[in-house]
Image (spheres, rainbow, N blue to C red):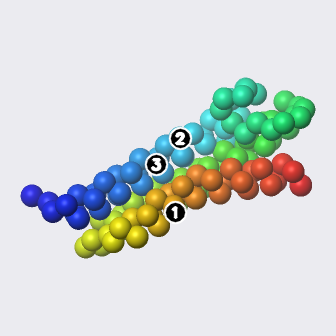
Amino acid sequence: MFGRDKMANIAEAVSSFVLGLLVCLLGIPLYYKKVKPNHFYGMTFKGTVSEKEWYAINHYGGKKLIQYGMILFPTGLIPLLTPTFHPVVSLLWAFFCGAMILIPCVQTLLRYYR
């Protein structure tokens, strides 16, 4: 049916779609300020952060998660459009997907500490 290379491309495409969708879905409740301050879900920082600040920080973080998830979601088409992915390209692809999750978190952290 499919060769090993094509199956790897399909697996990378599906993982990008799912990861992009997951990142967007995780950002939506934060953006709409539906998550109360806690230590498990949302951006938490050492020190005292008022409830108002917590909602503002997580609103911004949720917005960034949605934006980067929307970038990651359609990039899942790239592996489907290429004949084969070299292992190095696959590794770079994994770093790209990880960056799409870490960048919004770092942006939120930097905005908080300004």
Label located before the other in sequence (2 or 3) = 3
Q: Give the crowd class for mark 1: few <14, some 14-19, many >=20 residues within 10 Å.
A: some
Q: Earlier in the sequence, mark 3 or mark 1?
A: 3
Circles 2, 3 touching at the beta carbon (< 8 Å): no
Judged from the image, the secondary structure of the residue bearing numbered disc 3 is: helix
Position above or below: 52 against 61: above
For discs 3 and 1, the disc positioned in front in the rendered view: 1
Residue 25's mark? 2
What amino acid type should be assigned to the residue bearing mark 3?
Answer: Leu
Identify residue type, mark 1: Phe
Q: x, y percentage for residue 64?
A: 66, 52
Q: Is residue 19 above or below residue 93?
A: above
Residue 51, picture quadrant: top right
Q: Secondary structure at mark 1?
A: helix
Tell me the quarter of the image containing the C terminus: bottom right
Q: CA distance from mark 3 to mark 1?
A: 12 Å
Give the number of the mark in front: 2 or 3. Answer: 3
Q: Position of residue 84 (x, y in %)?
A: 27, 71
Residue bearing the label numbered 3: 19
Query: Left or right of 7: which side holds 85?
Result: right
Q: CA distance from mark 1 to mark 2?
A: 19 Å
Categorize mark 3 by other alpha carbons within 10 Å: few (<14), some (14-19), many (20+): many
Q: Residue furthest left?
A: 1
In this view, the residue in front, 90 or 38, is 90
Residue 96 badge = 1
Q: Which mark is residue 67?
A: none
Which is in the foreground here, disc 1 or disc 2? 1
Q: Circle 2 sits in a helix, a strand or a loop, which is it?
A: helix
Would you say residue 32 is visible in this rendering? Answer: no
x and y percentages locating residue 113 in the rendered image: 87, 51
Which residue sits at x=25%, y=73%?
83
